[in-house]
Amino acid sequence: MTKRNIRTYAAFSIVGVSNTLIDFIIFFFLTACLVPSFLAQCLSYTAGMLNSYIWNRKWTFQVKKKADKWEWIKWITVNGAACLLTYVVLYVTQLAGFSLFISKAVGTLVGLMITFTGSRIWVFQTESKPSEME
């Protein structure tokens, strides 16, 4: 693993923590206000997603070119899929008897795997040497 990859993973993790805090705070605030969990999940995930886009683009993946519509479409596709899957995990784990907090945490971990992979290899892909991708 290269120093660049370690830096990228570390930056993604820091941004991810901030996204997760935003997501969890909004989600649990909305559910405490009796907003249905599906709507709360969509709203809270979107807030974290916007934070993620800004910081991952500028800091984690250090994209220099101006954003275009295709980057946005790819970003929304990856995060839309992750949001949907996190809700499915949230729903299924709650049906299995897990608490809302545990269900949300498991869903968030699943979403994290999807967004990192999709962001790195598709949304913010940069032209680099094969050795940098290891």
Image: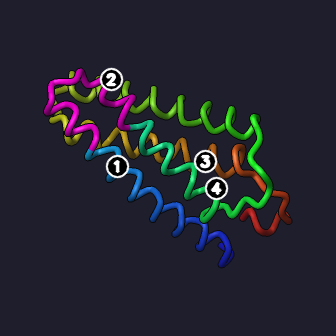
Marks 4 & 3, CB-CB < 8 Å contact: no
SS of the residue at dot 3?
helix
Q: Give coordinates of residue 114: x percent, y percent.
A: 54, 41
Q: Quadrant of the C terminus?
A: bottom right
Work out whether residue 13 or residue 19 is closer to the camera in this orientation and state it. Answer: 19
Question: Which mark sits nearer the N-terminus, 4 or 2?
Answer: 2
Q: Which residue is mark 2?
A: 39
Dot in front, 3 or 1: 1
Which amino acid, by three-letter code, is at mark 3? Thr
Q: Residue at x 53, y 29 (%)?
A: 80
Question: Which mark sits nearer the N-terminus, 2 or 1?
Answer: 1
Dot 4 alpha-carbon crowd within 10 angstroms: few under 14, some 14 to 19, many 20 or more: some
SS of the residue at dot 4?
helix
Q: Mark 4 to mark 2: distance in Å?
A: 27 Å
Q: Which residue is mark 4?
A: 57
Work out whether residue 121 or residue 40 is closer to the camera in this orientation and state it. Answer: 40
Which amino acid, by three-letter code, is at mark 2? Leu
Marks 2 & 1, CB-CB < 8 Å contact: no
Q: Residue at x 20, y 39 (%)?
A: 29
Q: How is the image coloured?
A: rainbow
Question: Which mark sits nearer the N-terminus, 4 or 1?
Answer: 1
Q: Which residue is mark 1?
A: 22
What secondary structure characterizes most of the magenta part?
helix
- Up-down: is 123 above or below 43? below
Q: Which residue is mark 3?
A: 117
Q: Quadrant of residue 128?
A: bottom right
Q: Give coordinates of residue 22: x percent, y percent.
A: 34, 49
